Image (cartoon, helix red, strand yellow):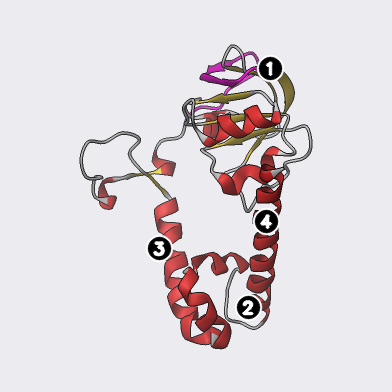
């Protein structure tokens, strides 16, 4: 029940913030309703009093966020993170799409087997065509992704380990999960039928 309450609270908060963002778009303060996510918690009260005062700063933060989102942070490093200007762009290295019969391996997260359409989701606020019974394919997950697990028949994640969020939630829901599937979000065609074997730690591509 505590998990259900947490998911409900997160969803209700998300709905309220999206409505605030929508109203700010209507009034010309935001270009995108998701700009509300650029607000810091201690700025919210001042923003509600005078949205125009913070709007330029929020646009700048959004632009910076988009710049960083286009980069691929190093997966492993020792000591301090490498300078951002040394990170490669995500579009500089594109993994080849997997075809029918290809098998991608990873780490078994939650046992079981499920077949469904792969839905590649890169942002939990934009689940796209994800529908009940689909296989959620994500780069990584945290609590903001939890509502999407409710619809998924299985979960596949680019990175993860035995105590990662994706595995814990999948076990609680009893759905197959495979993590540490390198390049899954790039290699699995969105909409293709895939079979997730959470026991063996494999993802097999079927016909689209």
In the rendered view of the protein, which quadrant contains the N terminus? top right
24 relative to 50, above or below:
above
Q: Earlier in the sequence, mark 1 or mark 4?
A: 4
- Residue 157 rendering spot, x and y as whole percentages: 54, 31
* Residue occupied by mark 3: 64
Taking depth in this image into account, of 203 and 16 the one nearest to the observer is 16
Which of label 3 and label 1 is nearer to you? 1
Is 197 a magenta residue?
Answer: no
Name the residue carrying label 1.
112
Distance Cα–Cα, label 4 vs label 3? 29 Å
Residue in the foreground of this view, choosing between 28 and 79: 79
Judged left or right of residue 110, residue 44 is left
On the image, numbered disc 2 is attached to which residue?
24
**Quick check: marks 3 and 1 in contact, CB under 8 Å?**
no
**Earlier sequence position, callout 2 versus callout 3:** 2
Would you place residue 81 above or below residue 17 in this image?
Answer: above
Q: Residue at x 79, y 37 (%)?
A: 132
Q: Nearer the viewer, mark 4 or mark 2?
A: 4
Residue 188: percent from left, percent from top: 59, 28
What residue is rendered at 47% in x and 31% in y?
159
Indicate which disc, 3 or 1, sits on the residue closer to the N terminus: 3
């Amino acid at each position: 029940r505590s998990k259900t309450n947490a998911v409900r609270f997160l969803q209700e908060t998300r709905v309220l913030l999206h409505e605030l963002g929508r109203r700010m778009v209507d009034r010309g303060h935001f270009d995108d309703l998701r700009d509300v996510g650029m607000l810091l918690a201690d700025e919210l009260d001042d923003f509600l009093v005078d949205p125009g005062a913070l709007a330029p700063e929020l646009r700048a933060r959004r632009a910076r966020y988009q710049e960083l989102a286009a980069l691929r942070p190093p997966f492993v490093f020792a000591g301090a993170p490498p300078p951002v200007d040394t990170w490669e762009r995500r579009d500089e290295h594109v993994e080849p799409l997997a075809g029918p019969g290809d098998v991608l391996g990873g780490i078994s997260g939650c046992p079981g087997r499920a077949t469904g359409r792969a839905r590649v989701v890169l942002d939990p606020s934009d689940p796209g065509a994800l529908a009940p019974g689909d296989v959620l394919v994500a780069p990584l997950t945290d609590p903001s992704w939890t509502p999407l697990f409710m619809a998924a028949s299985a979960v596949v994640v680019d990175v993860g380990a035995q105590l990662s969020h994706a595995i814990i939630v999948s076990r609680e829901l009893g759905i197959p999960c495979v993590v540490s599937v390198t390049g899954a979000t790039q290699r699995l065609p969105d909409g293709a039928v895939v079979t997730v074997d959470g026991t063996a730690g494999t993802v097999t591509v079927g016909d689209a």
